Image (cartoon, rainbow, N blue to C red):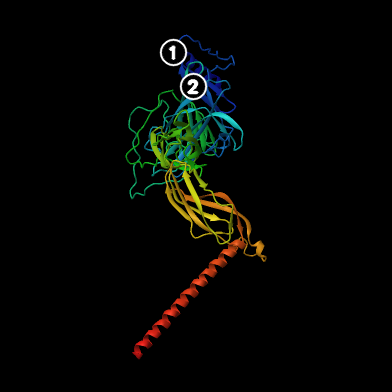
Amino acid sequence: MKKGIRGILLAAGILTLAGGEWTISEARADAGIRQEETGQTPADSEEEIPQEGDGETAVLPDKLRLDDQNVYPGMEKAYQDGYVPAVEENTAAVILPLVAREGSTIQSVTAVPDLGDRSQSPFVFRNYQKTFGKTVEQINGTEQQKEVFLIRFDLELVEERKNGAYPVNIKISYDTDAETEMQQDFTVYVQITDEKVTPSPTATPKPTPTAGPEPSASPEPTPEETPVPSAETPETEQPDMQGTEEVITDGAALSLGGADGGGAVSVAGTGEEKPSPEPKVIIMKCTGVPEHIYAGETVEFTAVLKNTNKKKPVQNMTVAITCEAEGIRLKSDSNTFYFDYLGTEKTLEVPLKFQIDEKTAAGKYTVLFALSYDNPDAEPLTSSGQIDLKVEQKNEVEMEVGEIAEEVNAGDSMQIPIQVMNLGRGMVYNVRCSVEVPGLRADKSLFLGNIDGGTAASGEFGVFAGIVNEDAEEADQRYGRTSGRIVLTYEDEDGEETQKFQDMAITIQPLEIRQEETTPEEESGIGKQLAAGIGILILLGGTGCGISVWRRRKVRKGRYE
């Protein structure tokens, strides 16, 4: 029986080769799996066809095979251990890991899922065609890695669905190193266990299939018409899969072959389907941003982007970065960054470096992010965001103290001249000076107000010399050499204070009462002056007495007459 079937297949291969088309079948009797590949044979090439009974197998130009031994991201089990596509919240995640032989030149594959009969299928119909490249993935939850074409489709489920096992026939096409277009079919069964059907008072008749072109030459049986094959089902009761054998493990079935290599069929969804949220990429945060960003410096930080969608990843993402200020420049060969893939609820980092011109005025400047990416259906999406950079001008303020005496006595007053210069480009505010020297006391600080960039302000404040050490017991210990500082205080535009200091030292002597000493000559002169003064006073007194006596005598004489 087997030899007869093999002869038929070989004969069919020879016949189809004559017409410019070829179909080569490879049988693995020990595993019960058969794959079929179809393609165009170049006119100038010759394909070696084995003769019946020679025991040889035809050599294919190249092909992909299912990696059924390893577990890849998104899978709970390997195919050989009973992989079942995960069904969560109205989405079925179908994963198909395909590997090529060593040295293969296959760079990418195109995959299209055939969802079967729309009237019976639990899936939302839309265009799912995607192109997958070769990637390096971790396997079996370890650090071990492997090159693979990791085919993944996140299939949305309709609201009303019935329990059962539903086939998803994934059609794979690619170009081989022999310049031949190859096609392979892989069928994965999705198990639905959360039936959602609106109750109806009357029975609903089964829909009658309508005539029309089929998406492939091998129509798939519906879940209601065909049970899932299992080891317990007799061979006579197996559904006719047109020569396609299936490997079924724990509710998941993989079918290899049975396709005619036809083109992909795209079916639009109905208006009753509810749209699912599209993935959204946002600027989650920025890390490493300096507390102060000064003009004239280079600032480096990292922007963290996140895909907020729980079900849909994004792919082919570009991030374009621009800044509205001419004085802020991105230090990169290009302002656009490319990222191949961003998984669900995953983040990625965009390292940024900006050069800020020293003439850039202080203030806030906006950096704009324009994001463009595709959803799993290769539909383009966009989003945008921004971050603010607060640029500050460095405050370069200097203080000069005028000449002051090296030594004073307690009780003396003195003036301290001050000049403050703003050497920066921005304004400084509330500029003031004070003295912190033991033994010197000021009635008030010197206030100079606001000073614009490139200007200066000056003034002086008076201080009073007192006791240096008030706690000293001895009088001579309360005075002497003392030192301290003059304090310059100013604020920036945010009210943040900055202080600068200049040292000062002075000697304070004890309070001293001075007495002037006179020479003998000076004393003789003073005595003569004193004697002359006394003589004048006596003369004046005598004259006054004489005048008084004369007047009295004159009065008496008048009375006698």
Q: Residue at x 33, y 32 (%)?
A: 210
> What amino acid is at disc 1?
Gly
Q: Is label 2 in contact with label 1 (beta carbons under 8 Å)?
A: no
Q: CA distance from mark 2 to mark 1?
A: 15 Å
Q: Does residue 122 appear in the picture of this structure? A: no
- Picture disc at residue 37: 2
Check the image and report above or below for 518 versus 18. Answer: below
Q: Earlier in the sequence, mark 2 or mark 1?
A: 1
Q: Residue furthest bottom?
A: 560
Residue 323 picture location, percent across and down: 41, 36
> What amino acid is at disc 2?
Glu
Q: Does residue 20 appear in the picture of this structure? A: yes
Q: Residue furthest right?
A: 474
Q: Nearer the viewer, residue 270 or 152?
A: 152
Check the image and report above or below for 305 versus 405. Answer: above
Q: Residue furthest top?
A: 44
Q: Residue at x 33, y 30 (%)?
A: 211
Q: Which residue is mark 1?
A: 20
Report the side of 561 relative to 476 (left or right): left
